[in-house]
Amino acid sequence: MNAPAPITQQRIFRFWTPLMATWLMMAVEGPFLAAVIARMPDPKYNLAAYGVAFAFAILVEAPVIMMMSASTALVDGRESFVKLRNFTYSLNVLITVFMVVTLFTPFFPWLTQRVIGLDPTVTDLTHTALVILLPWPAAIGYRRFYQGILIRHGLTRLVAVGTVIRIATMASTAGLLFQFGHFPGAVVGAGALTAGVCAEAIASRLMAHGTVTRLRCRAVANTGSVDDQAVTTAATGDSDRTALTYLGITRFYLPLALTSTISLAAHPVVTFFMGKAPYSLESLAVLPVINSLVFIFRTAGLSYQEVAITLLADGRENFRPARRFAVGLALAASLGLAAI
């Protein structure tokens, strides 16, 4: 969606609200699952294992987490859709292979027991949880690619609908496993996360079907502005061409992937030091609870990223209102966390 100028704070708010609701619903996952695991047998071991498994899975998914931003910025026709889709699928395969190699080689026990220093019980639970989470990173990349397409075409409400499906699937899966299964808490948490994300990925693809059909019907974006072409040109690195190349996509996406990877690497780094610190088991158990709380207040900024990309697609005339809204979000989130 190309927002006309001038744009008001109210219009930005209406465009941003469904995305904020999406991230806020995702932020509820952590506290909900932590609460479920805490009410199951051996909560200390299982919360610790769930926290370690989640930290590792977050690091693996980091290279694809910015795919929403990439598709929001770049997909404007059939060729860009096909090439970015192929790029997404290739990246999904790579991170899944990396996760498989890590889990099913001697590297995993060396990492968890000798490097991090986890309790053997926590190590076993973490391994089982990560095996269940194997589809999770690729499902994240898949659904964020299609969500970016929805956002570019102004269909942010459908993104929120997909997240409702994810939360409902996650909660029902956790409830069923809690009530009728005899599984460890870490397994319940991992199973619920995987089921929810896979359901959202399928829903996102189905909801984007109409938009994707229209994209496939045009070889090049005919309705895009000069600045839309500038975004694509920035990805290709060629001022005389507007068609995306795989090299251009890589050049455009690599800084985004590095940014998310470096940012999310904090989770396993903190986990490593927790494993070496006094009262490591207790600390690892409480860490996912703290992270879940803080994440709730991070959602305001995380949800605004694609909004800013969309607003600035027409040039810098929307820069001031977009910046003013961002400053307001930053202050509100900081004050909210400070109040807690």
Image (tube, rainbow, N blue to C red):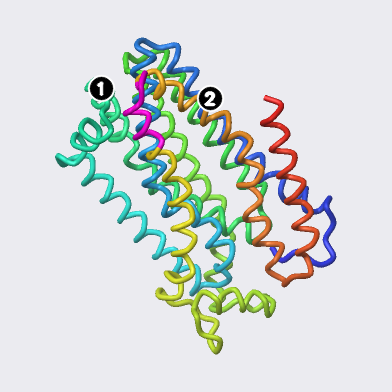
Q: Is residue 140 above or below residue 226?
A: above
Mark 1, secondary structure of its residue: loop
59 sits left or right of 113 in the view: right
Q: Which residues are magenta?
A: 270-280
Q: Is residue 328 above or below residue 190?
A: below
169 sits left or right of 328 in the view: left
How far apart are the two marked residues, 2 and 1, measured between alpha carbons?
Answer: 24 Å
Q: Position of residue 206 (x, y in %)?
A: 52, 50
Which residue is rendered at x = 66% and y = 39% of the image? 21
Which label belongs to residue 119? Answer: 1
Which residue is rendered at x = 55% and y = 79% of the image? 233
Image quadrant where residue 191 sits: top left
Instruction: Identify the residue under disc 2.
Output: 31
45 sits left or right of 293 in the view: left
Which residue is rendered at x = 67% and y = 76% of the image? 227
Q: Is residue 114 visible?
A: yes
Look at the image and tell me in which quarter the C terminus lies: top right
Mark 2, secondary structure of its residue: helix
Q: Is residue 142 visible?
A: no
Q: Position of residue 265 (x, y in %)?
A: 41, 45
Q: Earlier in the sequence, mark 2 or mark 1?
A: 2
Q: Looking at the image, is mark 2 or mark 1 nearer the viewer?
A: 1
Q: Is residue 273 magenta?
A: yes
Q: Is residue 157 above or below residue 337?
A: below
Q: Is residue 30 above or below residue 94?
A: above
